[in-house]
Every structure is written in C-alpha cells, then in structure tokens.
Amino acid sequence: MRNQSFLIGICILAVYLGMAGFGPEVAPHDPLAQDIGKALERASLTHPMGRDELGRDLFSRLLHGARYTLGIALASVCIGLFSGLILGSISGYYGGWAGTLIMRIMDVMLAFPGLLIAIAVVSVLGRGLFNLIFAIGLASIPVFTRLVHSSFISLRQEEYVSAAHAVGVPNLRIMFRHVLPNALAPILVQTTYEMAGAILSASGLSFLGLGVQPPTPEWGVMLSRGRDYLRIAPHVVTTPGVFIAVAILGINLIGDGLRDIFDPKLINSK
C-alpha cells in the first residue's frame, strides 16, 4: 500500500479491465454504424470523443476495442508464459543435451527482434486475429524460457530440493510443487512487462495492416485508419493513441511495483 505507483497502475488496469468486460454493454452507440455526413465531427454531448473518418462514434469504438486489444495481449502472453514454463523448466532442471538444444534455439530466436519474428509469422500464416495472437505469443517464448531456465538452475541446488530427492519425491513434483513456486516472483514481474509489450506489438501490427482487419474496432486499426486525417482531425488518431499509451503505462507501473515488492533489498532498505 505504500507503493503509490503500483496502486496507480492497479487503478488504471482496473479501469481498462472494466472497459473490456462491460464496455460493449454500456457503449452509447453501435461501433460500426456509419454517418458519412458527420465524418470527423469533433467532440459533442452525444459523441464525447467525436467521430471517425466514416462518422462512427469514437467512444463506442474505443470501448469495444478494449476487449480486442487486451484480449490479444493476454492470450499471446499466456502462450509465451506456458510455453516458456515448460521449456525453461525442462532445460533448467534436467539440463543435458535436451536443455542445451532448447536454449540454443531460444538464443537464435532472441537474435531477432520480437516484432520482426511476429511480422514474419503473420506474413507466412496470413492476417487475422488468431494468427496475430500466435505470432506475438511465439515471439515472447524465448524471454520466458531464459528467465525460467536461469531460475531453475539456481534453485535446483537448494537444500529443500536435495531433501525432496532423498525421500523419493518424483522429479515432476519437485519441479512444479517445490521449485516453480520459488521462481514465480521474477516470472510474475516479467509477465507484466510482456503484457505491455504485447499491447504495443498488437497495435503496431494492426497499424501496419498485418493484424486485426477493419472494420473491427481494435485500437491499432483505429490508429492506422485515422493517420491520414491527423492534420484536419487529430482527435481520430490521438484518442486511441492515448488509450494505448495509458494502458502500457499502467501495466509498467504494476511491473515496477511488483519488482520493488519482491526485491528483499528494497524491502529491507525501507
């Protein structure tokens, strides 16, 4: 409770989760309803954030878009997290040729920027929501794998692991019942950062036309469609841009707060 930035991040995330969960139900207008005659209209009482290039209500589209943007980020991070947990725990706990092979593959993937890997995957599989989720999730696997790998290497030398071996506890039970819970702190912190990165990647790929396709009200798509009107109607671009920036800021604040909470040196200094 003393970490104010963490609390601010929690409040921001709660608002966005509320938008994703209840936004479509409380949206005042149909996000796909067009009124060309009122295209690029500024903010008003009935349309508090104005209209886009096709006369659609921006506020309603942003509320609907929260479900797409946050859903894509959450699903892709889950793919990276669970894959990284499995691969990292095997390579870190067992080692051997299998662990070496896994880590060399991860090193090759880390040699390329995550966004470049996602672009390559989407280019091969084609555009679409599920391909976008898979591409972003695949790009995050090496980060989680290396983190879990290093955590397991350090923790498998602890005395409680040796004691579990001595009494005949199976390896899988030791890995997921004894070692993994003690490695969750850095994994949880990294998950928040990857979540913020996934929001940025999803919006970026949609902005480039490789992700979610129009007329779906995803925030990256809204940025892409509105960039041609930046000078004459800046609200069409700045509004979804601000929503993306605040979402990333809130999640990063949570990650920084969790890092401070789980760091014993910082705790002792306070």
Image (tube, helix red, strand yellow):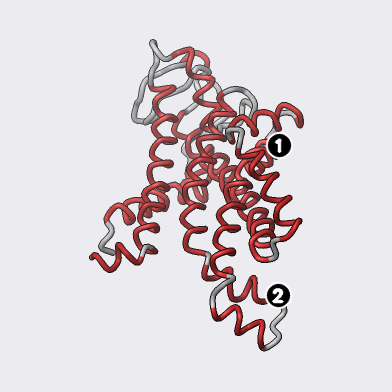
Q: Which residue is mark 1?
A: 131
> Residue 188 appears at what percent x and percent y?
49, 58
Q: Which residue is mark 2?
A: 171
Is disc 2 surrounded by few (<14), some (14 to 19) or many (20+) residues within 10 Å?
Answer: some
- The kind of residue tagged 2 is Asn
- Quadrant where the image shows the C terminus: bottom left
Q: Secondary structure at mark 2?
A: helix
Give 241 or 200, whichever is nearer the viewer.
200
Give the number of the disc on residue 164: none
The image shows a total of numbered marks equal to 2
Rendered residue at 44%/33% (across/down): 59
93 in relation to 141, above or below: below
Give 211 or 191, whichever is nearer the viewer.
191
Rendered residue at 56%/27% (across/down): 221
Rendered residue at 73%/50% (across/down): 101
- Residue 73 in the figure: left or right of residue 132: left
13 in relation to 61, above or below: below
- Residue 4 in the figure: left or right of residue 56: left
